[in-house]
Image (tube, rainbow, N blue to C red):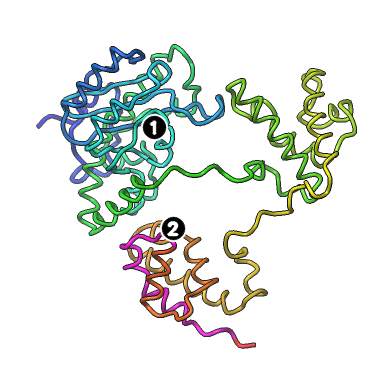
Amino acid sequence: MTDARDTASANPAKTTTEGQDPGQAPVPLLEPREGVPPVTADEAGLAEIVSAFASGTGPVAVDAERASGYRYGQRAYLVQLRREGAGSALVDPVGCPDLSALGSVLADSEWVLHAATQDLPCLREIGMVPRRLFDTELAGRLAGYARVGLGAMVENLLGYSLEKGHSAVDWSTRPLPEPWLHYAALDVELLIDLRDALEEELEQQGKLAWAREEFETIASAPPAPPRKDPWRRTSGMHKVRRRRQMAVVRELWNARDKIAQKRDVSPGKVLSDSAIVEAALALPSDARALSALPGFGHRMGRKQLEQWQAAVDRAKALPDSALPQQSQTPNGPPPPRSWADKDPAAAARLAAARAAVTARAEELGMPQENLLTPDSVRRLCWQPPSASTMPEVVSALRALGAREWQIEQTASLLTEALAEPAPAE
C-alpha cells in the first residue's frame, strides 16, 4: 500500500482521515497534481479551457480571488477550476471578462465551492451562474465541525495541510506572482475530494437531504438588491447622534465612494471611516479646522482638504427637512433587550423558543443559526400567528424563508414555545 506521504505532491488520494492515526500530522500538500497551470488571459486560451471542461466528467471545483481592501467593489481577479478529465485551470477575468461560455458548458454540472455565497456575486458578474452546487463550508457546519475554513476541513477530513498565506493579498496585481498562483491552484486541488468526504459524512448522519435543500436554496437565490443607505454602515456610526452630523457622514461617504470608484481603489484607502465620523462629530468650520482632526493630517493636500470640507459644508447647509432620519424604518422587531419592557409576553415566548431551538441544534450537532436563523425566531415570537397552531406556525416559517427540513425539526418546538404562558404581572 502506498503511503500518503509518497503521493502528497503528485496525486492526493480520495480518502478521509477515518482509519488513520488521529495523532498523525497532516501531510503538506506541496504541488498540484499536474503542476501549476498557466494563467489564461485571452480568448484563444479560454476556448481551450471551455472545450476541456466540457469534455470533463463529474463535479467541477470553482473558486475566485478578489482584491478586497485594495480595489473598488468585489470583482473577481482570478478564477480557479478543476474537473476530472480536464485538470485545473486558472483564468484571468481582466483579460477574459466574459466567462459565460464556460458557465454555459458547466451549467448542468454540480459546482463545488467553499463558502459559496462569498464567491457567487463576483462569478455572476462574469457570466458564471451555477444551477446546482455543493458548498463544502456549509456542509461542514451541518455536519457539526467546529472549524470550517477550507484548510481546517481538508486537514480534518483528508489529512492534508494547505498553505493559506496569500488569502488577503492584492489579486489585482499583474503579473500575479508565482507563489500566489501556486496557492490558488491548490485551493481547488482537493475541493472535490472534500466534497465526496462530506457527502459521505452527511449521509451517515442522515443530513444529506437537508444539505441538498440548503444548496438548492443558495443556487436559486436571486442577486441581492442594492443596500439601502449604505453610508449608515460606516464604522463608528453609533457615535453619531444628531441628524446634522448624520448628514455629514452621508455627504462624506458619497464623496469618498465616487472618488474610490473613479480611481478603482478601496474606499478606505481614500478616506477612513474613523475620519468621516470625526468630521461629523466636530462639524469643522473650514479646511484648516478639518486638518486638525484625526484622519485629515498634514499629509493630506490642500485640494483634498477642500473637497472634504465642501462635503461637510453641503451637509451643514441642508434644510432640516432634507436631513436623514435618526434611523431607518424598522424592518422587524425591536432589539430583544427591550422586549421585557415593551412586551413581556413576547419576551417569554422568545426565551422559550431560543432554549428549544438551541437544545435541538445541540442534539443534531450543528450551530443554532443553521437549524433556524435567529431573525426568524425573533420575528415569529414578536408577531406570532393569530392562532399559534402547528399548521399556522409551519405556514409562518415558510413565509420567513425556512426550508422544509428546518420546519420539520423546529415547528413543533416553536408551537409549544408560542403557547408559553405570559409572566405574571
* Residue 121 pos. (x, y %): 43, 36
Q: How crowded is mark 1: few (under 14 residues within 10 Å), some or many (20 or more)?
A: many
Quadrant (top left, top right, bottom left, bottom right) of the C terminus: bottom right
The amino acid on which the numbered mark 1 sits, given as a three-letter code, is Leu
Q: Name the residue under label 2.
A: 369
Q: Circle 1 sits in a helix, a strand or a loop, which is it?
A: helix
Give the Cα distance between marks 1 and 2.
26 Å
The amino acid on which the numbered mark 2 sits, given as a three-letter code, is Glu
User: Is residue 123 covered in magenta?
Assistant: no
Front one among 270 and 198: 270
Residue located 60% across and 66% down the image: 336
Residue located 52% across and 85% down the image: 421
Quadrant location of residue 398?
bottom left
Dot placed on the residue nearer the N-terminal end, 1 or 2: 1
* Residue 21 pos. (x, y %): 23, 42
Q: Is residue 155 above or below residue 295?
A: below
Q: How crowded is mark 2: few (under 14 residues within 10 Å), some or many (20 or more)?
A: some
Kindly identify which numbered label has been placed on residue 361. Answer: none
* Magenta-highlighted residues: 400-423
Residue 252 is left or right of residue 337, and the answer is right
Q: Circle 2 sits in a helix, a strand or a loop, which is it?
A: helix
Q: Mark 1 points at which residue?
A: 123
Residue 286 is left or right of residue 174, and the answer is right
